[in-house]
Every structure is written in C-alpha cells, then in structure tokens.
Amino acid sequence: MILSPELDLTLRPMKYPQFFQFYKNSVKNIWTTDELDFSVDLEHLRDRIDPKEAHLIKRLVAFFATADNLVAHNLVLNFYKHINSPEFRMFLGKQLFDEMLHVETYLLLVDNYIQDPEERKAAFDAYQTTPSIKLKADFCFKYMDSIDSLDKLDTDDKRRQFIENLICFAACVEGLFFFGSFAYVYFLRSKGLLPGLATATNWIFRDETMHLEAAMMAVGTIRQEYPHLFDAALEKKVEAMIAEAIEVEMNFCQDALAMGVSGLSPNLMREYLQYCADQRFVQLGFKKRYLSRNPFPFMVLQDVQPLTNFFEKRVTEYQKGFEATKSAVVFNEAF
C-alpha cells in the first residue's frame, strides 16, 4: 500500500501506473533559464513601473527568492521518504529537478531586477526578516516540523500527520501561496508589463500545476487505500488549515498592496483565494466552502481540457522557449 513502511523498489508489476504516466508527461516538458530574457523587463522597471507597482514587485521577488527551496526541502525530507510507490518517486525526482530550475530562475530574476548587493541579500533573507513573507515560511515549517521525527508510517496517527503535511504543501503552499503570487504577475502581464517575468511564470505555472495534480492524485490514492483516515476530524483540520493559509496569504497581500495598485485590492484577492481554495477542496474530495467567483478577468480559464491533453497539445510551444510567448497561456481547471 502507498503508505506502507515496507520499502517497495519494484516497478514490475506496476502498481501505480497513473504516477508513472505523470512522470512521462512531466519529462516531455523541459525548459532552461537560458531561454529567458529579462532585458525588456529592465526597461519597464526603469521607465514604466510606478512606485506602487515597484513595491508589489519587490515583495514578489522576495517571496519567490526562497519559496521553491522550501517546497524542495519538504519534498526530499518527507514526500520521497514516506510515499511508498517507486512510480511516484520517479515523478518526485523530476519534480525536484523542476524545483531547482525554479530556484535558478528566481536567482536570475533577483540578479536582474535588483542591482544593489545589499538589497539582493535582503531579498534572499526575506523569509526570515520580512514579516509577511516570514509568516508564509513559518506556516510551511510548522507542517514540516510536525513530521520531522517520523521514521516510519506504521500507525494511523503517523499516517494522519503525513497526510496533513501532504495536503498542506499541495493545497496551501503550491495551491494558494504560489497561485496568489502568479495572479499578481498575470495582472502586470495584462498591462503589458514585465514580459520576461510573465514568460518564466507561464512555464513555472505549468510545472506547478502538474505537481499539484500529482499530489492530489496521491491524496486520492491514500483515500482509497485508507478511507478510515479521511474522517470528520481530518476534514475539520483541512478546513482550518486552508482558512489559515488564506489569512497568511492575505497578510502578504496587505503588505504587497500597501501603497495601493489600481485594478487590485485586498477584497478582490481574498475572493480569488477563496475561489482557488474551493478548487482545492474539490480536488481533495470535499465540498466547496466559500462559493466565491473568480474576480479577475485576466485569470479567467481559457481551456478546461484534462491536464495530460493540455501537455500533449502544448508541448512543442513549451519546449521552444521564446516562441511560447507568442501564444496566449492556457490554463486548466486546476487553476
């Protein structure tokens, strides 16, 4: 079983072919930072970005600077260690590559956007020193630390702890924190600003969508094999966890929009986060809680085809780097 403490290294007969297919789909989509160009962004930062937008961008860059390292840290220490499926571990190997590529991308972003060495250092230290970003990091560490001492998932209580960590990083970190920040980027993109950042976000968004879908499939598989763990108590914990994540992200929103940005507001962002949260509840097998709409026209879903078809159809665009910027980004229902 997928949370068995007995290590399974056998790929034949294949027990979880769905995860192997996720691995194969993910491998189709490779990009590198050499394909990114921030030269136009530098012109926009100099000539077109006002101080209010500059503050928002500064906070985004600081969050991005270490966010994927946090995800990778949990992936290696917890997901890879405890999910007993060699097929899923293959996917996690590709996901770790993706996360390191995202880390490299944001390193390049900081190096291009922030010229002063002290300001660069401050960006990388923001998860410890900037309150709104530290709050996100503390949220992550709380759930990582809660299972740090788990060696084997040999009791139901330990399995519940692991499930909470898995749901935290799938639904809250990747499914809310990242998607909230992507919304700010696409807002700027809708105004014709920062095309380099938008291109990088397009590619990272696709990676994160697949990571999220795979994690949700893992949750679904655990639910099938251990249905007794998904009781009212767990559902109540998940509801509280997601509600807390929304408040953590709203704290970041209040900071990022502290100077005011025309077209964005905390009320709209809360509505959008609640909309995303409802998608996460559905993916987890629970009912929607907020019944909020998507308030952002620039984030309206363009395509609701299944994720695998999305990747098969768009793979050449994805692999050709700059040519991808000529086509509109296509989102799937997971968004």
Image (tube, helix red, strand yellow):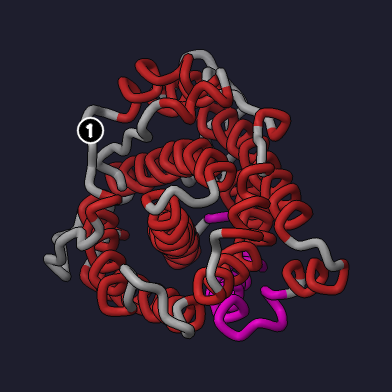
Classify residue 100 as left or right of residue 176: right
140 or 326: nearer the eye?
Answer: 326
Asked which quadrant contains residue 287, the reply is bottom left
Asked which quadrant contains residue 253, the reply is bottom left
Task: Tell me the kind of residue under disc 1.
Answer: Asp
Measured as percent of width and height from the top left, residue 231 is found at 24, 65
- Magenta span: predominant SS is helix
Crowding near the residue tagged with mark 1, few <14, some 14–19, many ≥20 C-alpha atoms within 10 Å: few
Residue at which label 1 appears: 303
Classify residue 171 as left or right of residue 80: left
**Residue 4 visible in the displayed image:** no
Name the quarter where the N terminus is drawn: top left
At horizontal 36% and vertical 74% (from top left) the residue drawn is 246
Classify residue 254 as left or right of residue 137: left
At horizontal 53% and vertical 41% (from top left) the residue drawn is 204
95 or 209: nearer the eye?
Answer: 209
Q: Is residue 73 above or below residue 335?
A: below
Q: Magenta region: which residues?
A: 126-153
Classify residue 325 as left or right of residue 309: right
Measured as percent of width and height from the top left, residue 315 is found at 45, 18
At horizontal 59% and vertical 54% (from top left) the residue drawn is 44
Measured as percent of width and height from the top left, residue 262 is found at 35, 72
Measured as percent of width and height from the top left, residue 281 is found at 24, 59
| Residue 130 colored in magenta in the image | yes
| Residue 47 colored in magenta in the image | no
Q: Is residue 157 above or below residue 78?
A: below
Q: Is residue 104 above or below residue 44?
A: above
At horizontal 62% and vertical 54% (from top left) the residue drawn is 68
**Residue 101 visible in the displayed image:** yes
**SS at mark 1 in the image:** loop
16 or 254: nearer the eye?
Answer: 254
